[in-house]
Image: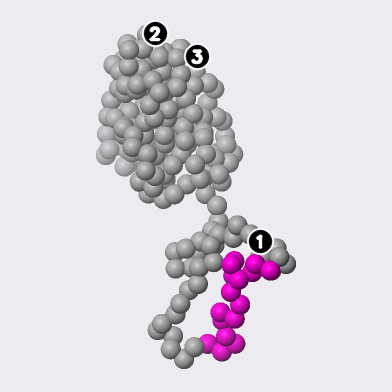
């Protein structure tokens, strides 16, 4: 992980499910046809009905933050993931840094894995994950509300989400540029440039020995 917060981790494996056998699905693809709509969605290998009678899958304690590893292990369909009334802070995608924004829902495509942080800061009772799985607050009372937020429609929302995950960056030897606390022109104007940067660090001619190069850090 790329952060030091010590939290409990939950794994959420979601995927589409077809009642047809794998050989039948293969024949469909070999004939140039689509697999069609799945017959359901499995969460951690189990089918849940979302009728309030399903077993509690995850338990959270009020005031604590939990790490959920969300993975789409299906074969065709993207799945929209949301925690009922709980925002998600995205912190990792495929083992890489992300901009830590909060999201009400996320589209997870086949083979993708996200890690999100969820804080249990709502009324202690049951809540739904993906509209099906029951999440319960420890010592909480009350069933999950049957009123679920409307699902996002269209691919534009998914593209908008992905455009916020990261920014274009360049690095030298794995180190990104960071602007100095004092702008260079101001430092020079007030006569404190030597505390911020150095002149004549690079000569007009390249050094004869290219094996030993020193990179100055002006952060």
State whether residue 154 is above or below residue 172.
Answer: above
Q: Residue at x 32, y 16 (%)?
A: 138
Residue 144 spot, x, y in % from top left? 41, 13
Circles 2 and 1, Cβ within 8 Å, touching? The answer is no
Mark with earlier residue (2, 3) = 2
41, above or below 196, in the image: above
Give residue 76's position: percent from left, percent from top. 40, 39
Which residues are drawn in magenta?
Answer: 191-206
Q: What residue does disc 3 label? A: 147
In the rendered structure, which disc, 2 or 1, sits on the residue that comes first in sequence? 2
Q: Nearer the viewer, residue 39 or 185?
A: 185
Say which residue appears at 32% left-offset and 28% top-offset: 43
Q: Is residue 194 magenta?
A: yes
Residue pointed to by mark 1: 183
Confirm whether residue 64 shows in the render. yes
Q: CA distance from mark 2 to mark 3?
A: 14 Å
Q: Residue at x 42, y 45 (%)?
A: 93
Q: Tell me how many marks there are.
A: 3
Residue 52 place in picture, x, y as percent: 36, 11
Q: CA distance from mark 2 to mark 1?
A: 56 Å
């Amino acid at each position: 992980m790329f952060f030091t917060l010590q939290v409990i981790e939950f794994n959420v494996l979601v995927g589409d499910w077809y009642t047809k056998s794998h050989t039948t699905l293969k024949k469909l693809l070999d004939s140039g046809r689509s697999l069609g709509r799945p017959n359901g969605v499995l969460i951690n290998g189990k089918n849940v009905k979302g009728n309030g009678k399903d077993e509690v899958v995850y338990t959270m304690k009020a005031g604590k933050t939990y790490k959920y590893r969300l993975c789409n292990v299906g074969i065709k369909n993207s799945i929209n993931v949301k925690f009922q009334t709980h925002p998600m802070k995205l912190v990792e995608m495929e083992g890489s840094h992300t901009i830590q924004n909060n999201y009400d829902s996320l589209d997870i495509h086949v083979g993708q894995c996200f890690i999100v942080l969820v804080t249990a800061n709502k009324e202690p009772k049951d809540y739904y994950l993906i509209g099906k799985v029951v999440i319960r607050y420890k010592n909480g009372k009350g069933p999950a509300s049957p009123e679920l937020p409307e699902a996002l429609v269209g691919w534009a929302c998914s593209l908008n989400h992905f455009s916020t995950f990261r920014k274009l960056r360049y690095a030298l030897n794995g180190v990104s540029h960071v602007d100095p606390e004092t702008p260079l022109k101001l430092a020079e104007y007030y006569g404190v440039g030597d505390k911020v940067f150095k002149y004549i660090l690079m000569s007009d001619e390249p050094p004869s020995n290219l094996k030993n190069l020193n990179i100055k850090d002006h952060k």
